[in-house]
Image: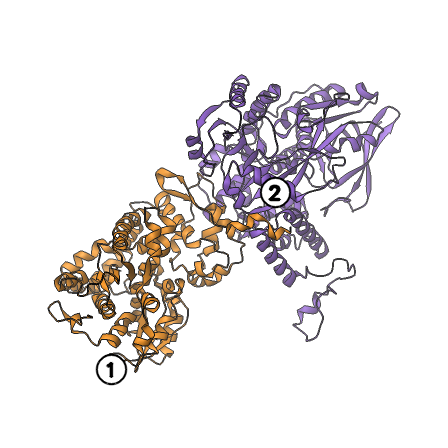
């Protein structure tokens, strides 16, 4: 038997991380370093390392740092806070090193053990990570909130007091949240025990862009799905990125419980935000072990991907048109969509619709990466990372942008001034028309029966 | 007749270096000769266990007692070489209850702090322990870096006036009648020599007294003066895991057997070992099945080992000895005690003693006893201080650990560097110059590599054992050439190239027994990188194959054959 055929290689190299200190919820990821042979492909794909000389890159943050660690060491290097959590390293790695899992865990340990809970950075990060907790206030008085957050004085204060980049405009709150609209509408208009989805709308399409959520409702009802909108908390993405693993754990516990119940009721889970679906599918099983975590991960889909698999979406779109509403788009595939293998679908689908084209602006990162680009100290690097995307948007034969990630869309708008649309909105316009349903609870909807 | 030195110590392992330090600090004039790099023999090929004595608590209580005493001493005098990991003797369902009880009682008889842990408690300490481990005895085993410890002894001996001559192979014992009065050495004949005397030159070193501390090689040395020393070398295999699956020493609680110990060692874990007598300590088979059998057996204690990456395997040779006529068949039954053979008493040949047997943990006590003997022979009255005086690097460690200075390094790099350097950290790491990480796997910076070069010359394997550079998961694939680069311009190109070749060869040697799974991928990547950048795929049999590197400097010329004829 040759060495290469040794039986030890048959195990699939899967290791089960183990909680070293069960009370602290710490996980031993050192065995994950076994998969790294230091090729540095992750470092070449890291958008932060490309622009920030102080950032040592994912190979150090992940396998190297973990390998150097001993059980009782608690000195994670502070540079882990510079990781933007774009997770491109995961896809780059030819050897399945659990890089983002290592980063998320190391970051949580750094925040827990090394970051002062009294520091401005901690509170700023906690606020950014817990947008879900602040958003309801803004949504309660959206006009006041939008007026106040839009003031230059507010932005100046935000930067000086909290370290939130003053160049950024805070997103506007919708005057009616998606959930308010959904309740007023009376919930689902299609009942179908055989075709059921539970919609994980996330925070942004609830509080800020309910038009995206409404587009999803129209598209799915068009295909005859019964839509459930279960109770839900933040997906946890901004919390992972800020090392607030305990906050994320609480949110995840709610989400897993509620979504698992929906799965029991025969639903699959769909999300319109690519980071939300990424979180439910990959980060939850990597970081948490609630009952049903794996079930939820295995039954969660990106909303467009789901229709491509379960319906003949291409045939349905063939020959449709969107009229004057939309023109050509510069399309940016978010990193978290790319990680899920979804980077080609929007361009393909829009190609089927008459009068609208999506021009792919390349595979670079937008640079905002959730909360990363909101931090004063990261603003310049965030814009430097985004420069390639801005250039390509500028070159593309379009004056509007298209993407599936809320913060990517903020960055695209910030860098180009273009209006940014979600792919689902275009699909809704093509399949259902401009849908009076979307305008308010009292309108008669496009029933799918 | 004037002699070159008072005492000549043969062998640069733990015993030889310990004796050299002991005698030098007593004020004697000492020369130590070693045929390779320090620790090249048995010392550099051990599992790194600092015994609590628990291992011998049933079979050999005298050794056990000595171990716990020396264990406590080394924690004090060699803190920067020791990691206080603690140890567990774990019992599986098929292991004997009686033996477990005997082990516990034995530990208590020998003054070894021992505490019984339930299987659940043991798994809380070490989460990767097998589910069916029933019970464990917790003892103060530790991990020790034999390289660092040996070098620290040698450095302290030098600081007290000793001459430490590495790469000086003994080619003859000088004997006149019934008196041994020195040795003849050949300089640079061994691997790695890149400084001092010209390679191939010989030198006679005469001494009042010669101590043969060459362990498994003691018989070969003795035969140079027609002295018969019945060393029974016994080989054992050790396998290095890429990461630490355990942070505590794990022993199997059963009478004896192969493959019963896992020692966390720096960034790795070392699996050990086997015990098989060999005829020649320099030439014995290294079999792949020994590695596989060991991983299989130890997976019963820590199942994750079966699917974990190993980075290399190596074999060591124990210098076992038993007095003539004992006739023990199984090498595992041969005592681990040491023997001081005074050839005057034994063979009627004065001027030399040989030291055989023994174990690493008690090297200092052995050295003290031998030094006492040497002093007696030379009529010197001086007392031993090695149990009280910390080794270089271990002074004021408590104060060092309290210090917060990270020397501008990334946290884990700073931590590992400070642990390796101990109290020398500030002297080595505080630099105004750029201090990049040279070895990323082990977190070794340029400053530390340069310090090691200062201490050991252009011998990159000596730099390796001082710093751990190139001992991580890429096994030097990414850093060997960067280490070599640090030799320039102090050493010329030919020297640098030869030093690099030796380091690369040494790194490949141990990997031959780890070429499957991820380490095979690593090796393929290393090979490709070295082949494309350093022409390492040239035909090694082509002795004339000097590459004209200058020819590349002008940029590519189409059609020029750049490779050897492979």
Query: Going by the picture, which residue comes out furthest to the front?
Result: A194
List x then y, in percent, for residue B450. Answer: 60, 48
Query: Going by the picture, which residue comes out furthest to the left?
Result: A442
Name the quarter where the C terminus of chain B is drawn: bottom right
Q: Which mark is residue B292?
A: 2
In the displayed structure image, the side of residue A116 where residue B10 appears, left or right: right
Name the foreground residue: B311 vs B534.
B311
Q: Are marks 2 and 1 on the same chain?
A: no
How many residues crowd mark 2 within 10 Å: few (<14), some (14–19), many (20+)?
A: some
Q: Is residue A339 visible?
A: yes
Vertically, is B482 above or below B275? below
Vertically, is A206 above or below B114? below
In the displayed structure image, the side of residue B327 where residue A235 appears, left or right: left
- State the hue of chain A: orange
In the displayed structure image, the side of residue B206 where residue B400 appears, left or right: left
List x then y, in percent, for residue B346. Answer: 80, 20
Identify the subunit bearing mark 2. B
Q: How many marks?
A: 2
**SS class, disc 1:** loop
**SS class, disc 2:** helix
Identify the subunit bearing mark 1. A
Name the residue: 78% across, 59% down.
B543
Give the Cα separation between the discs numbered 2 and 1.
Answer: 69 Å
- State the hue of chain B: purple
List x then y, in percent, for residue A306. Answer: 32, 65
Residue designated by label 1: A323
Name the foreground residue: A434 vs B340.
A434
List x then y, in percent, for residue A321. Answer: 27, 81
């Amino acid at each position: 038997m040759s060495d290469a055929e040794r039986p030890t290689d048959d195990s699939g190299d899967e290791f089960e991380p183990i909680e070293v200190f069960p009370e602290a919820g710490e996980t031993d990821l050192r065995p994950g370093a076994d998969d790294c042979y230091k090729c540095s492909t992750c470092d070449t794909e890291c958008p932060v390392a490309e622009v920030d000389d102080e950032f040592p890159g994912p190979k150090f943050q992940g396998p190297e740092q973990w390998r150097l660690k001993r059980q009782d060491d608690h000195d994670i290097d502070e540079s882990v806070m510079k990781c933007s959590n774009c997770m491109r390293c995961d896809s780059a790695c030819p050897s399945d090193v659990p890089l983002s899992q290592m980063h998320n865990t190391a970051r949580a340990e750094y925040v827990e053990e090394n970051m002062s809970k009294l520091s401005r950075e901690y509170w700023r990060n906690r606020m950014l990570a817990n947008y879900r907790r602040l958003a309801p206030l803004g949504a309660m008085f959206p006009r006041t909130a939008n007026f106040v957050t839009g003031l230059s004085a507010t932005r100046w204060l935000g930067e000086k007091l909290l370290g939130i980049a003053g160049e950024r405009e805070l997103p506007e709150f919708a005057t009616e949240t998606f959930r308010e609209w959904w309740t007023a509408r009376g919930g689902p208009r299609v009942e179908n025990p055989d075709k059921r989805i539970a919609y994980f709308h996330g925070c942004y399409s609830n509080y800020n862009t309910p038009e995206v959520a409404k587009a999803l409702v129209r598209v799915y009802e068009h295909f005859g799905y019964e839509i459930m909108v279960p109770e839900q908390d933040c997906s946890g993405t901004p919390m992972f990125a800020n090392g607030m693993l305990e906050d994320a754990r609480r949110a995840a516990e709610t989400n897993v419980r509620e979504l698992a119940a929906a799965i029991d009721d025969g639903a699959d889970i769909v999300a319109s935000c690519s980071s939300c679906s990424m979180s439910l599918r990959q980060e939850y099983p990597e970081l948490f072990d609630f009952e049903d975590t794996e079930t939820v991960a295995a039954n969660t889909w990106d909303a467009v991907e789901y229709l491509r698999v379960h319906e003949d979406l291409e045939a349905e779109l063939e020959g449709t048109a969107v009229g004057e509403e939309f023109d050509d788009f510069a399309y940016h595939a978010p990193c978290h969509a790319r990680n899920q293998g979804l980077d080609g679908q929007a361009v393909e689908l829009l190609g089927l619709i008459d009068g609208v084209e999506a021009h792919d602006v390349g595979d670079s990162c937008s640079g905002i990466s959730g909360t990363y680009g909101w931090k004063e100290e990261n603003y310049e690097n965030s814009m430097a990372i985004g420069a390639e995307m801005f250039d390509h948007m500028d070159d593309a034969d379009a004056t509007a942008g298209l993407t599936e990630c809320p913060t990517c869309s903020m960055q695209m708008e910030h860098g180009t001034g273009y209006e940014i649309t979600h792919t689902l909105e275009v699909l809704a316009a093509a399949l259902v028309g401009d849908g009076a349903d979307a305008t308010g609870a009292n309108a008669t909807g496009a029933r799918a029966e | 007749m004037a002699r070159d030195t008072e005492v000549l110590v043969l062998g640069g392992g733990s015993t030889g270096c310990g004796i050299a330090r002991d005698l030098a600090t007593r004020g004697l004039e000492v020369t130590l000769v070693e045929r390779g790099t320090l620790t090249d023999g048995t010392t550099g090929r051990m599992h790194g266990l600092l015994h609590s004595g628990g291992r011998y608590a049933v079979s050999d209580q005298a050794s056990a007692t000595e171990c716990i005493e020396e264990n406590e001493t080394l924690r004090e005098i060699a803190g920067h070489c020791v990691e206080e990991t603690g140890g567990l003797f774990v019992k599986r369902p098929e292991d004997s209850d009686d033996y477990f009880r005997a082990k516990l009682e034995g530990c208590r008889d020998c003054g070894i702090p021992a505490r019984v842990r339930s299987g659940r408690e043991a798994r809380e300490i070490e989460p990767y322990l097998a589910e069916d481990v029933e019970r464990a005895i917790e003892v103060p085993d530790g991990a020790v870096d034999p390289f660092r410890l040996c070098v620290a002894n040698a450095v302290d001996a030098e600081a007290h006036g000793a001459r430490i001559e590495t790469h000086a192979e003994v080619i003859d014992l000088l004997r006149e009648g019934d008196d041994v009065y020195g040795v003849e050495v050949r300089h640079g004949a061994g691997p790695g020599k890149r400084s001092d005397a010209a390679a191939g030159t010989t030198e006679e070193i005469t001494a009042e007294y010669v101590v043969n501390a060459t362990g498994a090689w003691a018989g070969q040395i003795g035969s140079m003066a027609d002295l018969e020393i019945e060393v029974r070398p016994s080989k054992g295999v050790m396998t290095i895991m890429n990461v630490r699956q355990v942070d505590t020493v794990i022993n199997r609680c059963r009478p004896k057997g192969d493959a019963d110990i896992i020692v966390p060692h720096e960034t790795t874990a070392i699996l050990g070992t086997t015990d098989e007598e060999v005829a020649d300590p320099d030439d014995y088979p290294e079999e792949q099945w020994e590695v596989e059998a060991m991983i299989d057996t130890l997976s019963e204690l820590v199942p994750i080992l079966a699917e974990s990456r190993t980075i290399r395997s190596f074999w060591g040779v124990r210098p076992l000895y038993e007095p003539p006529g004992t006739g023990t068949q199984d090498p595992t039954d041969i005592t681990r005690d040491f023997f001081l053979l005074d050839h005057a008493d034994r063979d009627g040949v004065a001027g030399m003693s040989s030291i055989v047997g023994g174990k690493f943990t008690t090297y200092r006590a052995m050295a003290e006893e031998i030094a006492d003997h040497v002093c007696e022979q030379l009529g010197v009255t001086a007392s031993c201080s090695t149990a009280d005086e910390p080794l270089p690097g271990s002074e004021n460690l408590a104060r060092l650990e309290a210090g917060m200075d990270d020397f501008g390094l990334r946290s884990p790099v700073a931590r590992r560097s400070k642990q390796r350097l101990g109290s020398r950290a500030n002297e080595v790491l505080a630099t105004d110059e750029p201090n990049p990480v040279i070895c990323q796997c082990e977190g070794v910076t340029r400053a530390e590599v340069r310090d090691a070069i200062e201490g050991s010359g252009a011998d990159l394997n000596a730099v390796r054992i001082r710093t751990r550079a190139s001992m991580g998961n890429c096994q030097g694939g990414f850093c060997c050439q960067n280490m070599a680069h640090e030799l320039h311009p102090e050493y010329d190109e030919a020297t640098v190239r030869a030093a690099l070749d030796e380091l690369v060869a040494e790194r490949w040697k141990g990997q031959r027994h780890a070429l499957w799974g991820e380490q095979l991928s690593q090796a393929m990547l290393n090979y490709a990188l070295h082949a494309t950048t350093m022409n390492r795929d040239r035909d090694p049999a082509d002795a004339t194959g000097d590459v004209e590197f200058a020819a590349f400097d002008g940029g590519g010329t189409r059609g020029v054959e750049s490779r050897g004829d492979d």
